[in-house]
Amino acid sequence: MRDDLARLFTAHKASLGMLDWSDEQIVAQTNDIVGALIACGIHATAHGDQAWMERHQWFGEAVERLLADQHAVPLDG
């Protein structure tokens, strides 16, 4: 699951504001990135920040896939 999320985060470097991070740094900080996205998602939901939710919809979809025992990153792209 962690590897899947790390691949997802490297694919979304730009939307995470992490273009200057190496893939290795993202892999090493995957747990922290997950925690930050969950905390920000809770905050966005509580405050009606629809723009944040739309901008990070890919993360919510990945979590849904993982909870359904699928890959975070779709195998077809």
Image (spheres, grey):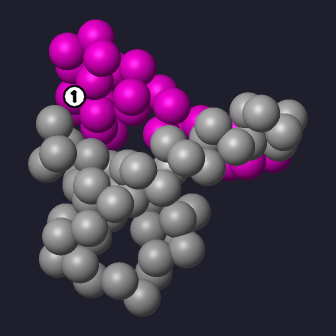
Q: Which residues are magenta?
A: 50-77
- Name the residue type under label 1: His
Count of numbered badges drawn on the protein: 1
Q: Is residue 29 above or below residue 20?
A: above
In this rendering, position of residue 65 left or right of residue 13: left
Instruction: Residue lying at the far top in this picture: please name it.
Output: 68
Pick whichever, 55 or 1, lies toward us. Answer: 1
Q: Main secondary structure of the magenta part?
A: helix
Residue under numbered circle 1: 71
Identity of the residue drawn at 63% across and 37% down: 42
Q: Is residue 76 visible?
A: no
Residue 52 locus on image (x, y percent): 73, 48
Identity of the residue drawn at 20% across and 15% down: 69
Name the element at disc 1: loop
Pick whichever, 72 or 32, lies toward us. Answer: 32
Quadrant housing residue 64: top left
In this rendering, position of residue 6 left or right of residue 32: left
Residue 1 locus on image (x, y percent): 16, 36
Quadrant where the image shows the C terminus: top left
Residue 10 locus on image (x, y percent): 32, 63
Quadrant housing residue 73: top left
Instruction: Residue lying at the far bottom in this picture: please name it.
Output: 20
Pick whichever, 48 or 27, lies toward us. Answer: 48
Residue 29 locus on image (x, y percent): 26, 67
Identity of the residue drawn at 86% across and 35% down: 48
